[in-house]
Image: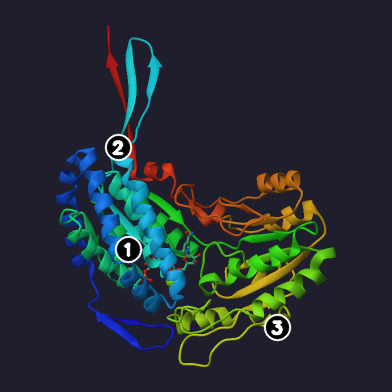
């Protein structure tokens, strides 16, 4: 049995039978059987099915938000925002079946053109931090492209995936096209990656598990896309609107209690601005309302588990001074206050490893070149922000940073219409935007002789 808990109270939400390898194999077999008919639907019919599914999700948005808020411990306002983004993903990709795909290419003696074909059965493996949101970024393009899917959500947060499976069926997605299997990554997840009838794995999770998946996919030459960890910089130049930069910095790292792969958890501040920036930052961090996820005014909830709290706490090891500490409720619940370490040496463990919790480090820098050097000195390359009033400098730094997603004078960079993914050990492949379909299709090149 899998015991699903509410991180804010540590109480049991429900118990779910844990799937094993044979249940996973049965789901893959169902997906394999249903894939040809789903693929053979007219583009209009598949588009229609996906927009019906978006409408069904819309009708259940409050229910889904509440489930996610309770199971993941995230503020209800955030959970509702995430469900809106889930619906956006299905609306956006519901147009895909009818959009142009492929190209014509001038060649001698005939006509060459390409078509894009679905892969067949696609395996989706997702983490616990944004459970249904991250799943939707895979589900929507995979289904739009004509694949059947097997989704393995994280055992800590399976609730919205299971509800999604029911809603997809009620909305008219043919049986067997969407399959959710709840079981441990080390058994069921591993089997999904190794399964010979699964054409591709789309994974979001830690860099460590990403490495294992890439290796386990190799024997079957399985296609893999990986969205992994991050240690993203938030670079604040002295000529920035410091008040705005300091007001935005906490949301960029303490959102979702810091359990966000895009967290801008390394705040790089130009030396001459550091005192003013820290004063502003302290005010904002102290005012963050940490508490009951179901209270509409809550801004930060608990961590996902006792294990996560222990892992996060290990970064308060005296290596760097605690400059700011916000508030957090007493137990029960896996609470951890928003915390800022400053100043932090770029070589300190807290400055190098992904913490995945509400701890930010402030690292001083001298000039543009120093900022770029520190920002890029990491195995990761997911996200980042740049704050300055100098447009040319903003663009120079944006081009120099080694990361897949960036924002200038803003801390938001994830939108359904724009590509999302990492450089370096933050993964490969892109989700969202028009190119996501590339990750769920094969290109076939056809030559038609005319002479
Ligand atoms: P995780 O430990 O890597 O687990 C992610 C998923 O993989 C879970 O469903 C897990 O199953 C499964 N899994 C574990 N071992 C596996 C194996 N050997 N084969 C197949 N599947 C396996 O990550 P997490 O702890 O859930 O989430 C935190 C991490 O995710 C952070 O490092 C964060 O940076 C990253 N993340 C990245 C993004 C992004 O878009 N780049 C987004 C969110 C999170 P069970 O846990 O259920 O056993
Ligand atoms: Mg894990």
Q: Position of residue 101 (x, y in %)?
A: 35, 33
Say which of 77 and 181 sits in front: 77
| Quadrant placement of the C terminus | top left
Tell me whether the residue at label 2 lies in contact with that at label 1, contact meaning CB atoms closer than 8 angstroms.
Answer: no
Q: Which of the four quarters of the rendered structure image does ligand 2 lie in?
A: bottom left
| Quadrant placement of the N terminus | bottom left
Q: Which residue is drawn at 65% across and 60% down?
A: 233
Q: Could you tell me how many numbered marks the image carries?
A: 3
Say which of 268 and 204 sits in front: 268
Instruction: Find residue 228 and name its label.
Output: none
Name the outermost residue toward the right. 272
Q: Where is residue 31 in the image (x, y as percent from the top left)?
A: 19, 54
Q: Is mark 1 within 8 Å of ligand 1?
A: yes
Q: Is mark 2 on a helix, strand or loop?
A: helix
Q: Name the residue under label 2.
A: 98
Q: Earlier in the sequence, mark 2 or mark 1?
A: 2
Q: In which quarter of the image is residue 178?
A: bottom left
- The Cα–Cα distance between marks 1 and 3, rounded to whole angstroms, is 38 Å
């Amino acid at each position: 049995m899998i015991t699903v808990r509410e991180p804010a109270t540590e109480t049991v939400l429900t118990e779910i039978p844990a799937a094993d390898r044979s249940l996973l194999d049965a789901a893959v077999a169902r997906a394999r059987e249903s894939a040809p008919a789903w693929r053979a639907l007219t583009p209009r019919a598949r588009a229609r099915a996906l927009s019906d599914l978006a409408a069904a999700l819309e009708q259940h948005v409050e229910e889904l938000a509440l489930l996610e808020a309770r199971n993941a411990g995230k503020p209800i306002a955030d959970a509702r925002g995430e469900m809106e983004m889930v619906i956006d993903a299905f609306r956006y990709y519901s147009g895909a079946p009818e959009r142009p795909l492929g190209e014509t290419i001038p060649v001698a003696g005939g006509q060459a053109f390409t078509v894009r074909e679905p892969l067949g059965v696609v395996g989706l493996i997702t983490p616990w931090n944004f459970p249904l949101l991250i799943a939707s970024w895979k589900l929507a393009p995979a289904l739009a492209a004509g694949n059947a899917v097997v989704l393995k959500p994280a055992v800590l947060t399976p609730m919205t995936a299971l509800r999604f499976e029911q809603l997809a069926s009620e909305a008219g997605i043919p049986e067997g096209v969407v399959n959710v299997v709840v079981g441990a990554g080390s058994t069921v997840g591993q089997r999904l990656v190794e399964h010979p009838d699964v054409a591709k794995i789309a994974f979001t999770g830690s860099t460590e598990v990403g490495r294992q998946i890439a290796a386990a996919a190799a024997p079957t030459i399985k296609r893999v896309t990986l969205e992994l960890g991050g240690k993203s910089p938030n670079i604040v130049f002295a000529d920035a609107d410091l008040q705005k930069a300091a007001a935005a910095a906490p949301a960029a790292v303490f959102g979702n209690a810091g359990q966000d792969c895009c967290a801008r958890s390394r705040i790089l501040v130009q030396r001459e601005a550091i005192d003013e920036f820290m004063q502003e930052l302290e005010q904002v961090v102290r005012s963050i309302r940490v508490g009951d996820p179901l209270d509409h005014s809550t801004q930060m909830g608990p961590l996902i588990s006792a294990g996560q709290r222990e892992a996060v706490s290990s970064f308060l090891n005296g290596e760097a001074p605690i400059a700011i500490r916000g508030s957090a409720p007493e137990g029960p619940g896996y609470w951890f206050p928003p915390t800022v370490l400053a100043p932090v040496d770029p070589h300190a463990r807290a400055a190098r490893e992904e913490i995945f919790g509400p701890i930010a480090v402030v690292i001083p820098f001298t000039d543009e070149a120093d900022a770029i050097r520190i920002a890029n000195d990491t195995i990761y390359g997911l996200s980042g922000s740049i704050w300055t009033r100098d447009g040319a400098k903003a663009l120079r730094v944006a081009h120099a940073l080694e990361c897949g997603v960036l924002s200038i004078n803003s801390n938001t960079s994830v939108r359904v219409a724009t590509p999302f993914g990492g450089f370096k050990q933050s993964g490969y492949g892109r989700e969202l935007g028009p190119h996501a379909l590339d990750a769920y299709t094969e290109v076939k090149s056809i030559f038609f002789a005319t002479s």
